[in-house]
Image (tube, rainbow, N blue to C red):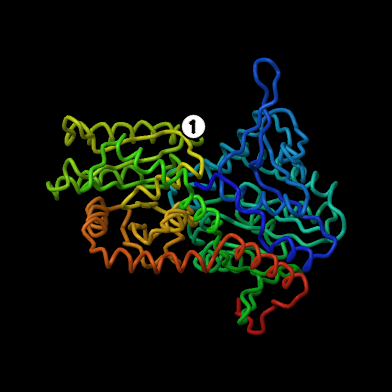
Amino acid sequence: MTTDTPNDGSPSRALLADLFPGARLIIAANRSPFRRTYGLRGEERWERPAGGVTAALDPLLRQTGGLWVAAESGAPQELKVPPEDPSYEVAVLGVPEEVYRGYYTGYSNSGLWPLCHNLVERAHFRSSDWVAYRQVNRQFAARIAAEARPGDLIWVHDYQLALVPGYLRQFGVTGPIAFFWHIPWPPTVVLRLVPERKMLLQGLLEADWIGFQTEESVDAFTSAARRELGVRIQRSARGVTLLYQGHRTHVASVPISIDVQKVEELARAEHTQRLLPELRQRWQLKEDSVLLLGVDRLDYTKGIPERLDGFSRLLSRYPSLRRKAHFLQIAVPTRTEISDYRRLAVSVRRKAAAINRRFGEPGWQPVRLIEHNLRLDRLVVLYRLADVAVVSSLYDGLNLVAKEYVAARVDGDGCLCLSETAGAYHELRSAFPLSPLSPERIAESMARAIFASPHERRERMQALREAVRRNTVDTWLSRILAGVRGSVDGQLSGVNETPV
């Protein structure tokens, strides 16, 4: 749920200039880092959509300049951003509403999104949506190809744009292309439910370098490429290289992260310290109160209903926590044009209300639900206030909320309950693990965190903070830039070939 930009003092600018001298960075991502709208009187207004991609890449482009290509339904826009001090360009492709709906709401988010999260019963693939998906991907590639100069680094992001690398090569782009797949890559048996899977794989394999959040996704993608396309696989200490139709693609696990320094500065800031006692008083949090916190987009992959069921079990099982335990759930609406998401919102509201009816007493309502986005500085205050953060994703590419919570705990206290099926669990093994489909196990994990000794809390948090500090957003950027350079130079080719 990162919503603000990291510091501008990262070494990534120097690394980009060193590894790709004279190159311009071109980003392709569905969402623009800035959105310009107009008020009733025609006054210009600017919005900054939340998201980890924006938080990671906006500061780099501010330093280096370059181009960000995005898409929206409606008219195209040419922006110079940030508005207060323009340093790079944003080209927002205008897509007809019906086409955008088929590409984004349809193929991307009613097809690929649920399938990649192994929720196959929610996935729907329509031929008309595929036509729209191809059209928008081609539109992205055409715009980038018209702008790109020889040697520019083109970096494409996520499942909405899997065909862009292939189209770029068709348009004659020969320079380096990187791709980062932010969500899980499904097992081959699940991928085979996608009618167009071979074309998706072929499009991706025109990139020089592909990054994933976890080794599991690397293995799944490699297996799919071999089984579906017959690619040759070379492995070495440097990683995995796929050979397909004369082209080499290096594949690596490079989990995204956050600007740890920025979060820590906000956690120590004067306004944070001032707000903490104010919120405690406003929410009637006493000395013996326990605040549990969830921060999510209102998405069915996040396990919010199961989490609330787990909290209900906790209150049933531990009567001593009644009037003491408070659950604050930030649930930010998303993709409301999709019926599954609207039904989820209704379900979450009903569960929260049912818990409050069952357990609530005068002066204490156990669940507080907030259904709007919060800036990072406000989230950090809540991270500092919460005794326990609960991340119970059914399946997640990574989950930056877990890392933000840990980074915000500059006091060395606090507990993180983390789903074992969230990508972040690979790095944050000192969290209290939970099984996200079992309300009983969720309650068990919450109880372990709540009743943990001060020594155990601090020992776990120390290990978590060390893990988060080892891999920051700048580490992520640096590893990717170095990986792309190595793949383009042929330094990452393997020596041990896996037989097909």
SS assignment at label 1: loop
Lateral position of residue 143 relative to residue 393, left or right: right
Q: Amino acid at mark 1?
A: Thr
Q: Quadrant of the C terminus?
A: bottom right
Q: Which residue is mark 1?
A: 336
Which residue is found at the position 56% from the left and 56% from the top?
Answer: 259
Q: Residue furthest left?
A: 319
Give the percent coordinates (x, y) of residue 425: 42, 63
Asked whether residue 159 appears in the rendered view, the answer is no
Give the percent coordinates (x, y) of residue 70: 69, 41
Q: Residue furthest bottom?
A: 495
Label 1: few (<14), some or many (≥20) within 10 Å? some
Relative to 3, residue 75 above or below: above
Which residue is found at the position 73% from the left and 66% from the top?
Answer: 15
Closer to the camera in the image, 68 or 407 = 407
Lateral position of residue 187 relative to residue 244, left or right: left
